[in-house]
Image: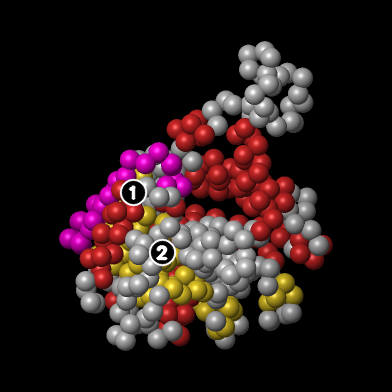
């Protein structure tokens, strides 16, 4: 969908003539009361569920969650996925042409925030004729958007499902993001963010950024169980399980091979400037900032009912961060359900098929559906 704009941004800038890519699943009912907005995390998109005909490996990033008969049941709900402004999967972003000067945006693309994304999503819902959402849902950065929806448009959201998220990033999380960004901006092929003009891509930086991120998404238990100290070949390693004939730059352990594979794959499809933009939006998000750091005061504006889910082995967005949100909502006497799942998968658990997690979400949406049936 194209928007003439302008969309005012929190930075004080604005953007005009922008496009948002989106997909919908299920059928909007006559009362327009069964719409659920699904917000995506860093490297995902509007393609939430299903597959594209004739395209191999095109499954939606939350296909196990969204679809007919699934926890977010598209036989009951009309589900909307939107690719955020500044992303690289169809919505206007750094790799597109700035209509104001006819040049690719590159590093000149304006800074965007979680709040800006929510405003853009609201504009798209307006264009679709949807005034009120039955629910808004997201995991990780998507959960931050869901939380922000309840603060920016409290009268437009009946339920918020916030999974593996946080009210803001810890200093450690910001540090991980900064190291990843430095890997990108110091790549010789980055060219100050205008690498498109040179016909190159800063793949080395993107690979390292992805490797850093991927380490933080997994738990120590999963990495040990999946890889341990296993070498790439069972015959390698004559001395203490290692082969000192290898160069220090060779891949010797399976975990090394796995991380390099993930980095290589990521560098082929993700935009470097988009990575910088989205991680900055993560860093900036902090609804308590304008309320003296008091989250309870910030969340007093929210009127929605909430489901929060966290995972015990998620050290990037730990359960303690979700409990901060739960406490702040209870301080305001809001209706809150909370599940803390003992899943071994770390932060990535929000994308996986833990039966307890799926059961909690399914049960919650069954309750939501009863409100309009």
Residue sitting nearer the eye, 369 or 217 = 369
Image position of 24 with respect to 127: above or below: above
The residue sitting at 66% across, 41% down in the picture is 260
User: Which quarter of the picture shows residue 197?
Assistant: bottom right
The residue sitting at 40% across, 50% down in the picture is 353
Q: Is mark 2 on a helix, strand or loop?
A: strand
Q: Mark 1 points at which residue?
A: 355
Q: Horizontal placement of 220 versus 193: left or right?
A: left
Residue sitting nearer the eye, 19 or 361 = 361
Image position of 102 with respect to 194: above or below: below
Residue density around tag 2, few if under 14, some if 14–19, many if 20 or more, within 10 Å: many
User: Which quarter of the picture shows residue 39?
Assistant: bottom left
Quadrant showing the N terminus: bottom right
Q: Horizontal placement of 190 versus 161: left or right?
A: right
Give the label on residue 87, or none: none
Residue sitting nearer the eye, 39 or 265 = 265
Give the label on residue 66, or none: 2
Q: Say if the magenta span includes residue 342.
A: yes
Q: Horizontal placement of 55 versus 361: left or right?
A: right
Separation of marks 2 and 1 at Cα, in angstroms:
15 Å
Q: How many labels does the image show?
A: 2
Identify the residue at the far left of this view: 333
Image position of 141 with respect to 120: above or below: above
Instruction: State whether residue 186 appears in this view.
Output: no
Q: Is mark 1 on a helix, strand or loop?
A: helix
Residue density around tag 1, few if under 14, some if 14–19, many if 20 or more, within 10 Å: few
Residue 34 position, x and y percent, is 32, 76
Look at the image and give the residue range highlighted in magenta: 322-349
Instruction: State whether residue 103 appears in this view.
Output: yes
Quadrant showing the C terminus: bottom left
């Amino acid at each position: 969908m194209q928007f003439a704009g302008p969309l005012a941004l929190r930075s004080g800038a604005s953007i005009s003539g922008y496009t948002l890519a989106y997909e919908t699943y299920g059928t909007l009912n006559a009362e327009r009361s069964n719409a659920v907005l699904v917000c995506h995390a860093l490297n995902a998109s509007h393609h939430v569920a299903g597959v594209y005909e004739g395209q191999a490996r095109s499954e939606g990033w939350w296909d196990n969650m969204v679809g007919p008969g699934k926890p977010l049941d598209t036989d009951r709900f009309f589900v909307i996925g939107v690719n955020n402004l500044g992303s690289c999967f169809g919505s206007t972003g750094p790799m597109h042409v700035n209509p104001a000067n006819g040049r690719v945006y590159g590093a000149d693309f304006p800074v965007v925030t979680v709040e800006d994304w929510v405003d853009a999503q609201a504009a798209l819902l307006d264009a679709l004729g949807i005034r009120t959402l039955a629910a808004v849902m997201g995991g990780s950065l998507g959960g931050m958007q869901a939380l922000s929806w309840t603060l920016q448009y409290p009268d437009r959201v009946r339920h918020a499902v916030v999974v593996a998220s946080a009210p803001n990033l810890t200093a450690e999380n910001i540090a991980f993001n900064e190291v990843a960004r430095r890997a990108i901006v110091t790549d010789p092929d980055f060219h100050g963010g205008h690498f498109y003009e040179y016909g190159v891509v800063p793949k080395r930086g993107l690979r390292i950024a992805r490797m850093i991120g991927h380490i933080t998404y997994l738990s120590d238990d999963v990495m040990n169980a999946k890889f341990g100290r296993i070498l790439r070949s069972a015959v390698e390693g004559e001395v203490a399980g290692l082969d000192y004939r290898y160069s220090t730059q060779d891949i010797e352990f399976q975990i090394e091979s796995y991380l390099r594979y993930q980095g290589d794959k990521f560098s082929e499809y993700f935009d470097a400037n988009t990575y910088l933009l989205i991680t900055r939006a993560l860093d900036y998000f902090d609804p308590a900032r304008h309320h003296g750091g008091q989250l309870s005061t910030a969340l007093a504006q929210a009127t929605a009912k909430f489901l929060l889910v966290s995972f015990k082995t998620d050290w990037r967005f730990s359960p303690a961060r979700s409990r901060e949100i739960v406490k702040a909502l209870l301080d305001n006497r809001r209706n809150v359900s909370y599940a803390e799942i003992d899943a071994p998968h770390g932060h990535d658990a929000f994308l996986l098929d833990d039966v307890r997690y799926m059961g909690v979400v399914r049960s919650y949406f069954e309750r939501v559906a009863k409100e309009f049936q």
